[in-house]
Image: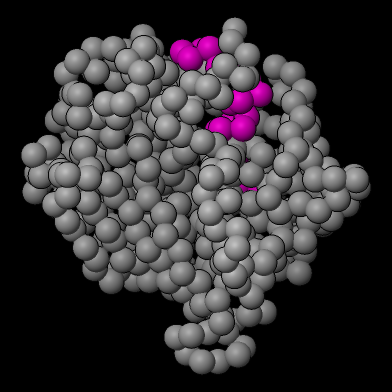
Amino acid sequence: MANTSDKFNKYEQRGVSASKSEVHAAIRSLDRGLYPNAFCKVLPDVAGGDPAYCNLLHADTAGTKAALAYLYWRETGDLSVWAGIVQDAIVMNLDDMLCVGCTDNVVLSNTIGRNRRHIPGEVLSVLIQGAADFAEALRPWGVHLHLAGGETADVGDLVRTVDVGFTAFARIPRHKIVVNRIQPGDVVVGLASFGQAAYEHQYNSGIGSNGLTAARHDVLCKEYADRYPESYDPAMPIELVYSGHHRLTDTVEVEGYSLTVGQLLLSPTRTYTPVLRAFLERCHEHVHGLIHCTGGGQTKVLKFLHQVRVIKDNLFEPPTVFRLIQASGQTDWAEMYRVFNMGHRMEVYTSPTGAQLLLSMAADFGIAAQVVGRVEPHESACVTVHSPFGVFEYAE
């Protein structure tokens, strides 16, 4: 098995970074907003001018998962895969904003940049309708998304296939903001990324919308490079392009479901807004931190720690999709936990009392949840992950 430094080299050659160190360096001098240790930037109430309120403005995309959807659509003709890409892009915004306490009335504006030679109007129609359908599906759960249109641009000189993103805005009372104040004595509740929540229509593999460049190229076979050269960066070393052994239509058995590799990798990103909306309404004072385990995986929380160690010693068993990715790329397990959520994509740092209430509420929403760890005093910020494959230490 290759060591971690080798895998870092492979990821860097593919042009990706789990830590986004260059991005964080570029924005280091910027104003961090009203609550510097909040999960995303919180602004004064520019929209309403009320000092008791604040504004949230956030932007994110489905990332390179759209390139995977392109392959799947071209191979199968299944247009419905694009609705999942819209959900990915929305949830990457929605759940980041959820981590500062925003649970309702989010205004969304889409930005779709396409290469018209490869992405026809019928794909655009599914992308645009998919946003409306996802908003409608969340409404019965008390989560209201307001679609404000957006921009669809033909930018073939810039985009090889399609880039799908959203900008999200919300205005909420300041007293509802969740600021990360993770402290010794907290327990960590992990909300599973896999399974089928009460508000989902199909089994979710847990993949979310992070690490898909690595997953796509490590898992899928070289024939896709020959047939779809528009689906990858031509500057990437050819030995790293689609270097796996699987086809998108290969079948995998998962918890009684028979799914294709394509379906596993393209499971839409789950939102936790319905369950955490209910939990925050009852238990806001017990919440000391909300962490969306996206870029950075199980180490994401490092950015929000001060003189504490987070010990994660009761994690979920890694779902099938992550075992498939690891085996295909022979990726070091320490790096897998740094890149992927590995079974839970939302962490709640709370009191033991709050944890018990959340476990009960998650079950009502059909989401597996468990206490995955705890917080202890430490001279510096660090995370210890106990896994079936070893104990891994991470520090800033």
Q: Is residue 36 above or below residue 158?
A: below
Quarter of the N terminus within the rendering: top right
- Residue located at (57% from left, 66% from top): 30
Q: For the point 60% across and 58% down, which residue is it?
A: 28
User: Visible in this render: residue 377?
Assistant: yes
Numbered label tally: 0
In the image, what residue occupies the spot 29% across and 20% down? 248
Question: In the image, 143: left or right of 226?
Answer: right
The magenta segment is 327-347
Q: Position of 184 compared to 326: left or right? A: right
- In the rendering, at what x and y percent does residue 86 appear? 31, 50
Residue 170, x across and y down, in percent: 46, 74
Which residue is depicted at the point 62% across and 29% down? 337
Tell me if 161 is positioned left or right of 395 in this view: left
* Most foreground residue, 375 or 198: 375
Q: Is residue 345 above or below residue 60?
A: above
Q: Please tell me in which quadrant of the rendered image residue 379 appears.
A: top right
Is residue 46 part of the magenta span, yes or no?
Answer: no
Residue 352 seen from this side: no
Figure check: 157 above or below 53: above
